[in-house]
Amino acid sequence: MQKSEFLRITPDNLYIHIPFCKSKCHYCNFISFANKNEFIEPYFAALKKELEHYFKNYTGVKLETIYIGGGTPSVVDFAFYKDIFKLLADLTEISKNAEITMEINPGAVNFNYLKNLRSLGINRLSIGVQSFDDRLLKIINRAHSAKDAVETVKIAKKAGFENISIDLIYGLPCEAGAYAQKGNDEFSLQGRAHSFQTSENWEESLKQALSLDINHISTYGLKIEENTEFSVNPPENIPDDELQSQIYLKTIEILEKNNFNHYEISNFCKSGFESRHNKAYWQNKEYFGFGLAAHGYLEGTRYSNTENLEKYIINPIERAFENKVSETAKLEEAIFLGLRLTNGINSQEFKIKYGVDIFQQYSKIIGKYLNYDLMVYENGNLKLTKNGILLSNSIFADFLE
Amino acid sequence: MIKNIRNFCIIAHIDHGKSTLADRLLEKTGTIAKRDMMNQLLDTMDIERERGITIKLQAARMNYSAKDGNEYIFNLIDTPGHVDFSYEVSRSLAACEGALLVVDATQGVEAQTMANVYLAIEQNLEIIPVINKIDLPSADVERVKHEIEEILGIDTSNAVMTSAKSGIGIEDVLESIVKYIPAPPDTSNKPLRGLVFDSYYDSFLGTIAYFKVMDGSIKQGDKIRFMANKKDFDVTELGYMKPQRNPAKELKTGEVGYLAASIKEICQFVGDTVTLVENPAEEALPGYKKAVPMVFSGMYPVDNDQYHELKEALEKLKLNDSSITFEPETSSALGFGFRCGFLGLLHMEIAQERLEREYDLSIITTAPSVVYHVHKTDGSMVPVDNPANLPLPQYLQYIEEPYVKVNIFTPNDYVGALMDLAQTKRGIFKNMRYIDDKRVDIEYEIPLNELITDFYDHLKSRSKGYASMDYEFNEYKKSDLVKLDVILAGEIVDALSTIVHRDNSFQTGQKLTSKLKDIIPRQMFEVPIQASIGGKIIARTNVKAMRKNVLDKCYGGDISRKRKLLEKQKAGKKRMKSVGKVEVPQEAFMAVLSLEE
């Protein structure tokens, strides 16, 4: 990792992974564990060791964003974070305007806990609300109710958090017939009967989210990932692609009407409240990653830590994976990350940063998608259209060598 | 000493234990130490081991101390067992004086065994029956002996009883080889004539030729001439296979081995005669009975830039498998490629797999076609091996298609089911005879076109795997045939055109379009699929447009995972061919072969 001090541009974004949870959600394949709380203490000791080790090589780091993700970071006692932030303050400089985010779950935190977090400088919360429908929450094995979510937002604001984001999932399954009792109009969409999450039902969730007066919303379409409860026992009544895409388009329409800017494939915010941390990923910037299974990108090399909790605790220094990103791969990543932003990629900036004219390098692919109306070039920016976003994975794959 | 040389091959049906027996012989003679044995040593190709069949013959030399106190040199030449490869069989037989006929004691004589035995009898080989798997509970040695005598007309009084798997009777086999198979004739005073029966390309040594010294002898450093190719070379390396290359100074009359002579050009040496430049033979050895390709298909690189690599690979493959033919052809859908001729469907599949594995190419193969004799209104006849080239209907007088004579050996329980199969495949019943009280030989005339689709698969499934078959070309017959075109997204895809009997055309069109609908993945736009005959649409369906393919969640900056996911999608796409703007998977071009009954 040693390089000349003069040449080094140190990243100013940092991610910390907290792999503990109260329970495992049926759709979740993140590295997280329920019922392993006895490992919390040794885990934080290891985390401190890792931070100390790597920041020895990085003096003069000034952090602009910190993101504590999980798992559910809020299941861990405040004292551990106090410790970590003290250490970070010793090892780095945390910018005065830094965006410091923590993921929390509704219902699992009280006013004091949040106030304490706020006192550490944490100024942004990402709350895993997922749905405002208790029946759906139960099906996906969330450990909270819709009411908990509303309450948590309320106390978060009281505790001094102005920058609050919530996560919502669309395309959730539902117990067959769960809606039948509510009458036919409740589960019809363009004349089709559905017994899973309906478009109306989702719009209701959005309405509730908007009523919370928050300034950032992330929406994710449910995907059945490997190694999840849902992959073992696949739920019936999952909306098909057609319905998912309709819900998605509807979401954009509703949120934009309510002054939310659709700034990234899955993210919406009020003016000035983009997630600065996540934006660093999409702008293909480098970042530090610490903790179990954490990923980082330093000096042109992407790396990750082990996914084995015990192994990490024994040796938090060793990287499980390191991969020097080739020049071609760097361009490809800049594209498939950059096009996630609805503002797209500025061709001028791209050329300055990578020394390559994106239109020359990828003329065939870009030309094809411009013709298909899946891409558009506007004001110097190359972006995906709404239909392009819906098919973004297919488009991104095309850019790979 | 020439009288101590024994050259032989093994004839067997698939699964009757030929490769296992060969392994035991290598082991028993100490050619290969037991610990070095990889199962089925002579099957060097991965495909062979995976499929459990032998495609390419391999030569192996063994030393054996017989009970008579003499040392013998055995040359075993392995042979393929599948119906497609009788050409290869005849090549290896020409280098032998005897053959072991391996018959499974639980199965009996199969259709293909019969065909290969006839080839061996034609070559005047001494045949030793080996009845294998005698230790299995269902073995019926007496019945099998009776079959060998009845069907093949071979005396079983010197038959050897073995279980290659358990190592029973292996020494008896070795002794029988010494006793019954004659030594090659001593013609050591004649000028060199070597019969090349196989060759392959080695990137270090150049072309390596396998050959048998029929007359005279050959030494390292000799200046040699390939008589048909009229090309001269210096022998740089000479030796025999044990079964790995084992250099030697000289090969004498009757010996089997290999030679390398820095032959860098890719030429057809198989079947050629090698002689010495200084003291040449007057006449070349009679060539092989050349196999005639029966099945033709187009082979196209998925990536058009690989055209030259495909050409080179085909040339190299032909060195090793001279029964393949190929000629350049173009398709409006697939671009530049080759029309290739094969002995049968399996042969075609094997060739494709070898090209992909050994030459790292990604290939689209079109559905196989037979050669039609197309009689035009002007009285002329053109052979057509590609449905896309069928003349327009107004110029057609009539079409003839090749019929083959098919022999099916089956337990009598399945006779009804198999006759029904032959009937649905436009078969004409010819004859039926009982081999014994349980087994029947049914003879049909069937259009080759019907046979090469999925006949063999159905034969196996309808008889629970018990029936076997063999076929040979019979004659051309007039048939009422039409060309069925497939239209993808408004454009005729010539590579999907097929020739079908008019009576089945409507049904085939329906089935083919619905099959294609399942095979072609959703694209970014709707893809209409239509089938037409003579411009008239007879079937239509649609592949719906893909609606959503988004990766939403950002996994704490796990970009590598995103990349992997995208790479996986990309890899899936690489197996597909862009036809117009539609991405079509390889299987689509073969869809017509596996339509439901």
Image: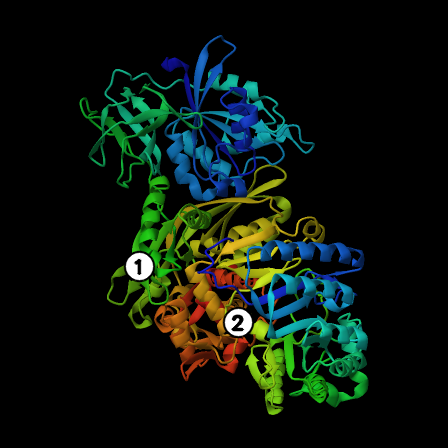
Residue at 73% x, 74% y is A119
Q: What residue type is labelled 2?
A: Trp
Q: Name the residue under label 2.
A: A282
* A286 over B464 or under it: above or below: below
For image coordinates 49% across by 69% down, the residue present is A336
Q: What element carries label 1?
A: strand
Residue B150 appears in the rendering: no
Give the answer, above or below, for where A306 lies relative to B543. above
Q: In this view, does B44 lie to the left or right of A140?
A: left
Crowding around mark 1 (Cα neighbors within 10 Å: few <14, some 14 to 19, many 20+) is some
Subunit of label 2:
A
**Who is closer to the viewer here, B193 or B414?**
B193
Where B481 falls versus B437 (above or below)? below
What residue is rendered at 66% in x and 61% in y?
A226
Q: In this view, does A87 lie to the left or right of B529?
A: right
Q: Which of marks 1 and 2 is in front?
A: 2
Task: Determine whether the residue tagged by mark 2 lies in a helix, strand or loop.
Answer: helix
Near-viewer residue (B242 or A331): A331
The residue wearing badge 1 is B329
Q: Residue B7 carries which label?
A: none
The disc numbered 1 marks a residue on which chain? B
